[in-house]
Image (spheres, helix red, strand yellow):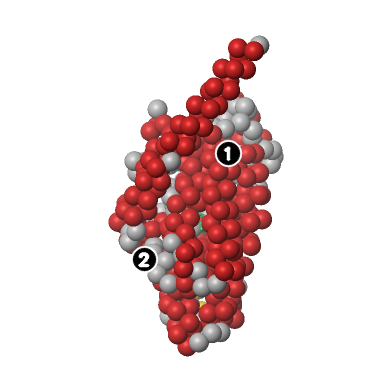
Amino acid sequence: MYAQMVKSTGEGVRAREDMSPEERHFQDRVDAGEKIEPKDWMPEGYRKTLIRQIGQHAHSEIVGQLPEGNWITRAPTLERKAILLAKVQDEAGHGLYLYCAAETLGISRDEMIEALHEGRMKYSSIFNYPTLTWADIGAVGWLVDGAAIMNQVPLQRTSYGPYSRAMIRICKEESFHQRQGYDIMMKMARGTPEQRRMAQDALNRYWYPSLMMFGPSDAESVHSAQSMAWKIKINTNDELRQKFVDQTVPQAEYLGLTVPDEHLKWNDERGHYDFSEPDWDEFFQVLRGNGPCNRDRMEARVKAWEDGAWVRDGLLAHAEKKRARRVAAE
Ligand code: FAQ
């Protein structure tokens, strides 16, 4: 059943005259800015789209722990190690808020995790790139968390109540994450020539994968139109990508680093930077499982899931015993 639940729902936006009375009432509530709550009536496509997007978001937070977790044992100082540990733990917490929000839509966490492990659900393309040096940890915080915030701040106003409330909590922590990444980059960019070279190299490798995080161009995006009509998404992929470039280029300049795009140029008329598109063939290859780390990431997640089975079994057995005792006492 859940194979259907997480299946793509990329059909066109329904015209008002084709809607049933319930659908019209639902759309009026969304248009009026009301929050939709778990027990409210909702179209099946709305529910499926939310499960797909929130589930993908939750998986991204959990898989996203791996590239940074890779550096916990090798952080350059005790202070940096403590900060990185806290950040990676925060990502686990974000995953849990999001799994809980998705569960209110009638899918279980186990079903979502099974779908991830079997390749039926996605996670963000960005986490299929390796963190080769300590400067990459700076770039992940600065660029990856920076892109995540750009996407997630508007999602605080998303129409589904549990998702919106999860995003409010998550955004508070993400802005700290972005600052810690920028702080690492500042230290590296103003350090020795070798540290500076590492910082530039991290920017070179993470720039385009970060631009890809916003999804395919608007012309290629299957879900944007309907998701925006339902206020599951607030902005298009290209709008957010442009905002990210406009915000990040001055930050790179402040670091004294060069964005690896020879066509990057401020456009006075548009009031925005012109920039080169990422390599979309590479993006779709990563989505198909052919990125540099896809296989490693899934192997690590499946192993963690299998290794943790005894803990889950123990907790469930304990809960069941408590429940049986309570029933017997009643
Ligand atoms: N990676 O029609 P659209 C984080 C898929 S933040 C993989 O445009 P949609 C924090 C898409 O699912 C990162 N797949 O789709 C952190 C669809 O495939 P489907 C996570 C992608 O949903 C920081 C197809 O392409 N944030 O983890 C990607 O309207 C540091 C067509 O695309 C979120 O998930 C991609 N980049 O828009 C953690 C935010 N882009 O399902 C640790 C919430 C697109 O039809 C360390 N999500 N696809 O098979 C969203 O805002 C949206 O889902 C988009 C995609 C914008 C990602």
Q: From the viewer's perspective, is 257 left or right of 120?
A: right
Picture disc at residue 274: none
Looking at the rendered structure, the secondary structure element under dot 2 is loop
Residue 254 position (above or below residue 77): below
Q: Residue at x 62, y 67 (%)?
A: 179
Point out the frontmost of discs 2 and 1.
Answer: 1
Quarter residue 125 falls in: bottom left
Q: Quadrant of the N terminus?
A: top left
Residue 221 in the image: state x and y as whole percent.
44, 51
Q: Is residue 236 visible from the viewing direction of this image? A: yes
Give amino acid for label 1. Answer: Ala
Where is residue 160? Give x, y as percent: 61, 39
Tell me the CA gap for discs 2 and 1: 33 Å
Residue at 58 percent across and 20 percent down: it is 323
Q: Which residue is mark 1?
A: 101
Instruction: Decide if residue 289 is on the left or right side of residue 197.
Output: left
- Secondary structure under badge 1? helix
Mark sitting on residue 279? 2
